[in-house]
Structure formats: C-alpha cells, structure tokens
Image (tube, helix red, strand yellow):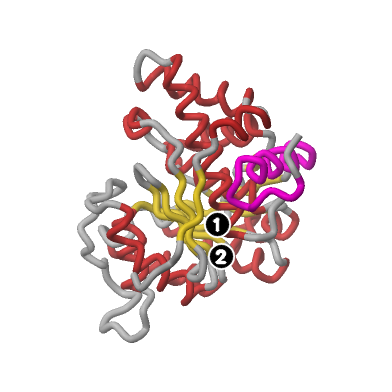
Amino acid sequence: MPMPDSPPWSGDAVAATLERLRARTPLVHSITNLVVTNSTANALLAIGASPAMVEAEEESAAFAAIADALVINLGTMTPQRARGMEAAAAAARQAATPWVLDPVAVGALGYRSRVAVGLLAHRPQAIRGNASEILALEALSDPDRPGAGREAGNEGGRGVDSAHAPEAALRSARALSLRTGAAVTVSGAVDLCTDGARLFRVGNGHPMMTRVTGLGCTATALIGACLAVEPDPLLASAHAMVLVGLAGELAAERARGPGSLQMELLDALYLLDGATVIARASLTADELRAV
C-alpha cells in the first residue's frame, strides 16, 4: 500500500496514481495516430482506463465535454481530423476536461506545425514530444519570432524521430511550459518533465522500446489517463512516463525482439502492481537551474 506522506516523485506516489486510475477507470477520449489506434486503445485498457477513439468533427466536441480526459496526437493529419481536434480541444477547455497534446513531427512539416500552434490556444494541461518536436513547437509558438505559427520550425527532426537529446530541449521545454501553462515532457533515454518551476527526470525504459512504433503515442495516452486522476499535470506526466517506461523494462525481460516486446508490454501494463512500481520507479526531482 502506498505511503500517504511520500514525496510526489517517489515510487509510492506513482503507485498511488496507478491505484486511483484503476479504481476510477477514467474515460479517455483519444484522437490519435491511425498507425497505432489499436495499440493505444489496448494500452489504455491494460492500465485500467476506458478508451474511446472518437475523432469525427460532428462528435468530437460533444464527447470531449463528457470524457475524463482528452488525448490529441498529430501523428496522421488530414483537414477533417484537424477540425475534429480543434472542436475537441475547444470543448475540453470549456468543460474543464484535462487534455494532452502530442505534437508529432511538428517542425518537420508546415501544415501540422500550424495546427499544433493553433491547438495551444485551447490550453492543454500537458504536452509530450521528443526533443526536436519540443524545440520546434516552442520556436513556432513564440510570438516574438518572425513567422511564428506559420511554417515548419526546421529544428532538425526527421518526421517522428528526434535529432536531439532531451537535455538539448530543456530550455525550450521550460519556455513552452511558462508560455502555455502546460506541463511539458521531453521523451528520451531519460525523460524530462517540467512545469517551468519544477523538473522531474524519469529513468525507466529500455532501448528496445525505440524499435516499436507508437510507444511515444502510448506514453501520451497514459499521460491523459493519469491527468484524469491526478490534478497536478506535472505529476500526472511524470507518473505516466514511469508507468510506460517500467512496463517497457518488464516487457524487455521476457521479449525476444520488438514484435514480442509489443505484446509483452500490454501484459506488463496489465500486471503492474504497487509493490513493483514502488521497488522499481526511477523518478527524481531536480533543480531548474539557469537553463
């Protein structure tokens, strides 16, 4: 049983978030990457949430207003999907539904970059991306930069792949958080989570996870699930990154390669328990020095 007086970066705190998630079974509205819709839904089910993959413009606003959390992932973009995202984000803000933005490939492609910057106006509680995506989104959303919000940031990303280490994006993550009010997570070998004032580092994970498509999308979805039960977006983000990273570690212990890792990860999410989380969570608080 998690200890009630444990610090928020402890394994006990992560275990408590997992316990609340499973007790509540939050309804998580996901407009996500079509490449990984099935695996994202299964990951949410495995961790204890209830997924709903509602994306049509005619339905997304109404559903976002009744969901416990909203996940918007820019992985596969069309004008129709963009309108559904816009409607859902606007409705979520009006209904006070917490939501998370995953700016997939922002900075590499102009259209999705403009969509992402526009969605920031609806005040996501959390943002998760790789270092190149966060560098680009921060640059594009800075109103003092020429051309902000209009064209690709040219920050060195290769589509969904990052050309930067997380530490290279720490300054931008902090600036983006302060500008938007969202907790910002930079994914990598060590994940960085900041709200502009605090910084958490998550060391859980396994290198084989980079060989399975969409595990970043899974992490974003789990942030959405945690947002439904943890009111502090920074803690929700950090705890979700621990859960998916730890599941990846456990899966890698049994997997023979990326194919079996994907299956084992779902089982690991389902089988995660408080004792394992407390024993193996790698979550540390750090000072946000002049970065």
Q: What element carries label 1?
A: strand
The C terminus appears in which quarter of the rendering? bottom left
Foreground residue, 213 or 52?
213
Residue 273 x, y percent position in the rendering = 66, 28
Q: Looking at the picture, which amino acid does disc 2 mark? A: Pro
Q: Looking at the picture, which amino acid does disc 1 mark? A: Val
Q: In which quarter of the image is residue 52?
A: top right
Going by the image, does 5 lie left or right of 42?
right
Give the class, few, some or many, for how many residues have Cα within 10 Å of label 2's Cα (few <14, many ≥20): many
Q: What element carries label 2?
A: loop
Determine whether 241 is above or below 210 in the image: below
Residue at position x 33%, y 34% in the image = 210
Q: Is residue 76 visible?
A: no
Going by the image, does 106 lie left or right of 72?
left
Q: How far apart are marks 2 and 1 (CA)?
A: 6 Å
- Mark linked to residue 192: none
Residue 51 x, y percent position in the rendering = 65, 40
Residue at position x 45%, y 40% in the image = 34
Circle 2/circle 1 CB separation < 8 Å: yes
Q: Give the range drawn in magenta.
A: 4-25
Q: Name the residue under label 2.
A: 124
- Mark linked to residue 100: 1
Is 95 a magenta residue? no
Determine whether 121 is above or below 37 in the image: below
Q: Is residue 103 visible?
A: yes
Residue at position x 52%, y 29% in the image = 247
